[in-house]
Image (cartoon, rainbow, N blue to C red):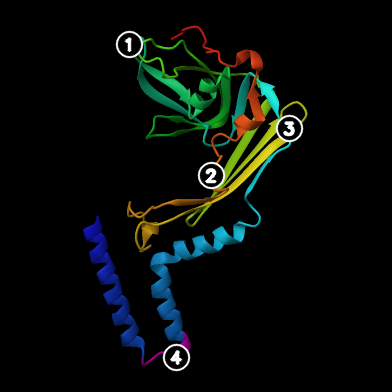
Amino acid sequence: MMFLFLIFFILYVAFAIFFIRSTWKTSSKLQRRIVIAFFVLLPSWDMVLGYIVYYAALPFVPKEAIYETAETDGIYYEGGPRNHLLFTDVYYFEKMTKEKRISFADDDLRRGYQYVESRITSIGDSITKAPVSPPETYRCASLPPDPKNPRNIYQHCVAAENIQSGYMVSTWSFQFARNEMNFIKIYSRTTGHLLGEYREVTRLGYDFIPFFIWLDWGEGRGQRYSRPEKSRLYDFQFDVLKVKKQNRGEFHGSERNR
């Protein structure tokens, strides 16, 4: 890949120089500047625009606020990344089986929540995703731990007609150029009261010069720069919605039903 990158880089620079020199005498000063700017910005427009968007968003987007906390048995999610029902092969009690699981629900179940509910908009394995229309609500609970893999969380997920959780974690993301903005709002489902909100803006850096990275060379993705500096995208809700005291320290699993 690096070899192809170098060849492409050399050919692009050579073509740009050839084109600019061949039109230099027949173009005006303004036209020359426009052509030079075009060849300079074409390979790196996403970096330039990414910087502009990132620093313009910093005074307005980042926020982390908790207005009220609550205790709950489970959490209900709408929006990514927990809107995908994952099908995966797992080895459970010496038997290979196809497991359904809500993405990232392990974090909730491991902390002691009895169940995780989510509005599912896609179903599939880690590679393929089939859209679900209209979206369906699924509820997942922990299965008894496998003695041979006691640290693993095994899930039993079923379609749910009614939402049990009294609270909703609403998330959505906005991507543009090399930037991503993530938003979280946590509500009481009975009163609509806002308990907390979180907003972050991130910018993707580069490992080398940003030359046509928007063509997805597969390299140069580099470091993520985020505000707040430490992302809370996956765990902010746990500071707002606490596990009920009687559930803390306990392992909750449904009866083994496969």
Q: CA distance from mark 4 to mark 3?
A: 63 Å
Q: Position of residue 1 (x, y in %)?
A: 24, 55
Vertical placement of residue 209 versus 98, above or below: below
Residue 68: which disc?
3
The verdict on residue 100 being magenta is no
Mark 4: amino acid: Ser
Marked residue nearer the N-terminal end (1 or 3): 3
**Disc with the residue nearer the chain's start (2 vs 3):** 3
Q: Where does the C terminus fall, quadrant-wise?
A: top left
- Mark 1 or 2 closer to N-term? 1
Q: Report the magenta residues as a range.
A: 25-30
How many residues crowd mark 3 within 10 Å: few (<14), some (14–19), many (20+)?
some
**Camera-side mark, 4 or 3:** 3
Give the residue pinned by disc 2.
230
- How far is the residue under mark 4 from the one under mark 1? 75 Å
Which kind of residue does numbered mark 1 sit on?
A: Lys
Task: Pick out the residue farthest to the right.
Answer: 191
Q: Position of residue 112 (x, y in %)?
A: 56, 19
> Looking at the picture, which amino acid does disc 2 mark?
Lys
Residue under numbered circle 4: 28
| C-alpha span from label 2 to label 3 | 22 Å
Q: Secondary structure at mark 3?
A: loop
The mark lying in front, picked from 1 and 2, is 2
